[in-house]
Image (cartoon, grey):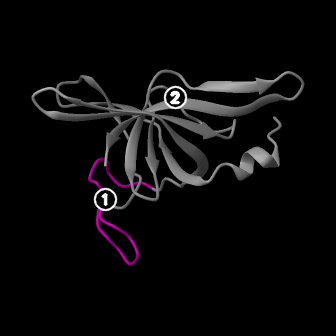
Amino acid sequence: MFTSSAFQRKLTDQVIVLNPALTLDEYNSELLHYPVAFPTSPGPGTFPSPGLYPETGVAPIWGRLEQTAAVEVTNNRDTQISDWLLFLMPDVVISGLSRVVRVSDRVVFEVVGPPSILTRPLTGPHHIEARLVHFSG
């Protein structure tokens, strides 16, 4: 696996990739359970959690988020739709079920479809590109 240092310098956003685990609810139906990106109670130098996930120790990684489209639909209510593209190193574990948290403002995105692993002919995997939509925050 080869990734140029020029590409690594472009990864300027800290993100947390949340990969779900399959659990059962009280009716034995399968449901996706996502780990937590931030503590649920504020501590020194932290902000309150958005309250989406229970607490675990998930570490941030470097990526690059770019907004590719923004549309505001106003039909009887205000709705904002935005598409994003996430660039990651090729060894990051991410799937079409993952969620991504931008550390700087704790905005949560959902991955749309399976991420693409882009390769170079002679050196193999170069980076991952994942399409995202705004989820919360």
Query: Quarter-wise, where is residue 46 in the image?
Result: bottom left
Which amino acid type is shown beneath numbered disc 2? Ser
Image point 36% across, 38% down: which residue? 134
Tag 2 or tag 1, which sits nearer the N-term? 1
Residue 136 on image: x %, y %: 30, 44
Return the residue nearer the eye: 130 or 98: 130
Residue 103 on image: x %, y %: 46, 56
Residue 83 on image: x %, y %: 43, 32
Return the residue nearer the eye: 41 or 118: 118
Q: Is residue 46 left or right of residue 116?
A: left
Q: Is residue 88 left or right of residue 16?
A: right
Return the residue nearer the eye: 106 or 25: 106
Q: Which mark is residue 95?
A: 2
Image point 49% across, 53% down: which residue? 58
Query: Quarter-wise, where is residue 26 in the image?
Result: top left
Q: Farthest left residue?
A: 76
Residue beneath disc 1: 49
State which region is magenta.
40-56
Residue at disc 2, secondary structure: loop
Image height of 6 relative to 114, above or below: below
Q: Residues within 10 Å of mark 2 (few under 14, many from 20)?
A: some
Q: CA distance from mark 1 to mark 2?
A: 24 Å
